[in-house]
Each structure stands twice: as C-alpha cells, then as structure tokens.
Amino acid sequence: MWNIFEHYKFLKHLFNFRNDVVVECSTISAIGSVLVNGILIIMDWYKYFADNILGVSVFFITMIFIIMLVDLCSGLAASKKEGQKRTSKKGLRWVFKFGSYVLFIYVINAFVKEVVSMGHDWLYVPLNVIKLYMLFHIVMWETKSIEENITRMGYNARIFGIIDTTFKNIKKIFSKQGINTEDNNDTSGKK
C-alpha cells in the first residue's frame, strides 16, 4: 500500500523547518505572498475609484497621471538645463494640479449620478460628453506643456504642429466666410 504513495516522499523534506533552505524559502514565499496580495488590493481599490467614483476607465486616469508625470520630469529637466533653481513648490503644485483635475472629474461624475437618480436622463449624455471633453482637454494641456518643456531644452518637437496648422486653417476659413457674408448683406450699394 505504501508503494503507491512513494512518489510523495519529497513532501517530508518540504516541511522540515529545521532545514535552513526550507526556512529561507518559506520566508521569501510569505513575504512575496503579502506583497502580491497588497498590490492586488491596491489595484482593486484603484479600479473601484476610477470606475465608480470618477466614472472613467482606469486607462484615462493612468494616462493623465503618466502624461503629467512626464510633464513634471521634462519641466525639471528644462529648468536644470536653463540653470533655474528647482524647488519643492513645483512638485507640490503638480500634486495640487493633479488633485484638482481628479476633483473636477469627480464633481462632473457626481452630477451625472445625481441626474440619473433624479430621473433626468436627458442630461446624462451631455454631462458625459463634457466629462470626456475635459479629459481630452487636460491631456492636450499637459501635452502642450511637455512640448514647451522640450522646446526649452533646445529640441524642436512640434507635437502639435499638425493640430495648430489645422486650427489656423479652420479659423481662416471661418473668418473668410464671415467677410463674404458681410459683403453679401451690404444693401447700401457701396463696394
């Protein structure tokens, strides 16, 4: 009968806590387990915060955080290259700026939840569009700031070159239409 369980003899050595290797491996395993579970709890809280409290996906909040972090690092590098004094106020200002962005997204999401709970479903889509617009606008602000920092470091990034050119051309089109409309509406006969 014991011949059947012969291939399980290694278990006796796994639980021999007098052996230093077993103690070391079990300690590393316990610490690793606590760390992994801690990371999973933090990630679960982060997902809950993004989905239920802010009403956006984890991707948007993470993207804004990373872009803002790149902006901070590029700003510090540009300040170093220009020889400006770096202070902790800039880092603290960055924290307040990120906090204000998160607070604004939270307030918009609270409005969305309130609108739904009160039965005003017709406001659900416009408020979500405003929230989405603000997310993209925040990303645009921060990316523009990164471009300015890169330019301060002496590089010509032109991240927004295409977008700036497009907006200028659209502005020209609308300004020309306004002039043509005024000329067509002139009834005095003077040209």
Image: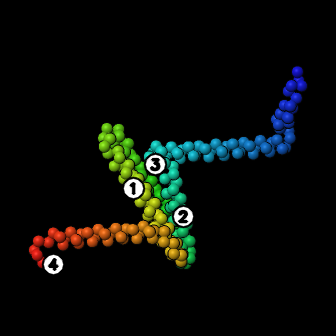
Q: Which mark is residue 133?
A: 1
Q: Which mark is residue 56?
A: 3
Element carrying mark 2: helix
Q: Quadrant of the C terminus?
A: bottom left
User: Which residue has dot 4 on it?
Assistant: 191
Q: Which of the two labelled residues, at mark 3 and mark 4, occupies the earlier sequence position?
A: 3
User: Which residue has dot 2 on it?
Assistant: 70
Q: Amino acid at mark 3?
A: Val
Question: Residue 18: percent from the left, percent from the top?
Answer: 85, 39
Quick check: marks 2 and 1 in contact, CB under 8 Å?
Answer: no
Q: Which of the two labelled residues, at mark 1 and mark 3, occupies the earlier sequence position?
A: 3
Q: Amino acid at mark 1?
A: Tyr
- How would you rate the neighbour count of disc 3 (Cα within 10 Å): few for under 14, some for 14-19, many for 20 or more? many
Residue, far left = 188
Q: Which of the two labelled residues, at mark 4 and mark 2, occupies the earlier sequence position?
A: 2
Q: CA distance from mark 3 to mark 4?
A: 55 Å
Q: CA distance from mark 3 to mark 2?
A: 21 Å
